[in-house]
Structures are given as C-alpha cells and as structure tokens.
Image (cartoon, rainbow, N blue to C red):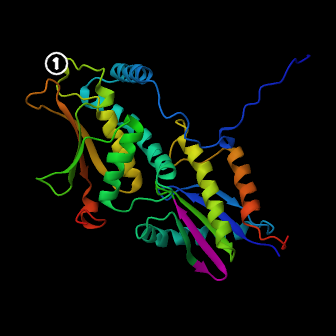
Amino acid sequence: MISVGKTKQYANVLDKLLSRGRQEVSLSAFAFLFSEVVQYNQTQVDNIADLERRLEDAGYAVGARVLELLCHREKGNRRETQLLGILSFIHSTVWKVLFGKVADSLEKGTEHEDEYMISEKELLVNRFISVPKDMGAFNCGAFVAGIVRGVLDNAGFPAVVTAHFVPIEGQQRPRTTILIKFAEELLNSKGIYN
Amino acid sequence: MASTACFVIVSKNDIPIYEAEVGSAPKKEDLAYHHQFILHAALDVVQDLAWTTNAMFLRSVDRFNDLVVSVYVTAGHTRFMLLHDSRSEDGIKSFFQEVHELYIKIFLNPLYLPGSRIASSHFDTKVRALARKYLYIRGIY
C-alpha cells in the first residue's frame, strides 16, 4: 500500500505538557452536558435520594482531580494541613477555577462545631434547571456538593456534604447553601478548634 | 558501584499502585521483598509527618542500615516513596516533581479509578527514564 503524506502521530497524553490550556469552556456546552447527565441518571433510579447520590458520586470524581490539579498549578505544590486552609482553598481557588468567581460566602455553623456552609446566590449548574414541584427538595447542586466532598475527602478531611435551597425574602429564586459536616474523628485530632 | 533504588507509589488507602526497582544493581527476588517491607514500615512515620508541614517533599523520613527512605506527599495524600542509598537531595526532589506531573496526567483521566494500579507501560518507561536522569550521580557509571 502506498501511503501518501505523513501518517498521523498520536502523542501519548503523558508527553503533552500539563499546561493551563484555555481557561474557559462554553457555558451552553456545559449546561447541555449537565442536563444530559441528570436526565440519564433519572432513568437509572427510582427515587430522589438515589438521584442525588449519583450526582454526588459524579461530582466526587471531579473533586478528587480538581484537588490534585489545582494544588499543583495554583498553589505551587503546597498541601493544606489545616481545616480553615482547605475550606478557604475551596471557597476561593476551586470556585474561581470551576465557576469563574469566588463563592459568595463561607460561614461557620452556629449550632454545631463541625458544620460549615458555603453559600451561593445561584449555582452555575442550577442556572438552566427548573425542578418540578413533585420532586420536592431535590437540588442538582448535589453535583457541586460531590465536588466539595471529593476535595475534602482526598485532602484528609472526611465530611458529609449536602446542597440545600434556602428561601430568602425579597428574592424570587432561593439561595443555595452547601452544608459541610465534618466527620467525628476530625473533632478530636486535626483542628476543628484551631 | 551499583546503587539500590526502589520507587513505590502508595495511594491514600495504603495500597501500592505502582512499583519499580530503578537502581542499577542486578535484580534479586529476595531483595525486592526486603525493599517493599522497609517501605511499608515507613508508612506510619510518613502519616504523622505529613500533617506537620504543608510542603510536599518530606526528605528522608526513615533509615534502615545504610538505606534511606525519602517521601513526597501529593495534595491527595498519594505518597511517592523512594528507598535508596545516600544520594543528592536535589536530584531526588526533581525526580519526585517530574513523576508528580506524570501522575497528575494519569489521574486526570476520567476513566482511571483513583487508587487502582497504574498499568500504563508508557508511564513505566517515562519513570525509569526519569530515574536514570535524576538519580544517578555522574562519574560513577
């Protein structure tokens, strides 16, 4: 067989540079992909709790990778060993890279020592999603909760992370709060009280 | 002079996901087990040490006879451990940093299950090439 021209070389991904790449991705493309993810998972489960769990697991995989990549790129290879450090890392760096802006607020829970909340007026992933009344309190922000859980868990701060709608008077759409509840063992060791 | 060097990547759950004998000494089966044992024993020390600093390179954390264990911990608590006879620190640090970049590229693959073995032969080739580049003192070979 006579081959004309150059054969295409497929460079192995390990040989390519870990560059910053293009910083932005089309919002419509993401919204479309995310809506397909939600719709696909809806066909696989019977109830809302399972749907939220699946979205969370999808987010967990993203969170794990985001942690490794951003610590390498943004923080010059410094790990986080303090609770407040990792929370502010999520609140600013992770949010900025994923959603283009830092999170609206990071608060410590008043009732329990081990609860923290990241609030956002409107999560990017929820912007084009409307939840029908019969799905109750379902929040696609479970995906973002999964991302946060992935980051915390892999950094060594196991936590249960959930997304909730918080209605605010005067606003038509409720605010979204990501509630982070750290695991028991952290209370004793690494620095909830630091 | 032959050198011993055993490189292992241990995941967050204390499961080795990659190992390679990168020294120039001839391979012997019982030596390999011995190396794994030493590295495994050093894991406890690494666990404690990792929380005391936010640097990734932990230098030498443990000694055994004339062998030294150097460790590098990534953000996701994946440990790169190198068992070696005394060698220049700069070379080891650069070696770890380059392997870290390779590891991130593997990790970013959405089809790679975190904590599973790294099976890519290309990764293996590159790690061995990096070991030859950074871990061998010039003039001895």
Rendered location of residue A23, percent (x, y): 49, 35
Q: Residue at x 69, y 54 (%)?
A: B127
Q: Which residue type does callout 1 highlight?
A: Lys
Give neighbour class at mark 1: few <14, some 14-19, many 20+ (Cα, 10 Å): few
Which residue appears at 87% of the width and 17% of the height?
A: A4
Which residue is outermost to the right?
A2
Evaluate whether residue A53 shows in this view. no
Overall secondary structure of the magenta stretch?
Answer: strand
Query: Magenta segment range?
Result: B63-73
Q: Is residue A11 above or below residue A5?
A: below
Q: Which residue occupies 78% across, 65% down?
A: B27
- Left or right side of B132 for A134: left
Q: Which residue is mark 1?
A: A133
Q: Quadrant of the C terminus of chain B?
A: bottom right
Q: Position of residue A148 (x, y in %)?
A: 34, 44
Q: How many tags in the picture?
A: 1
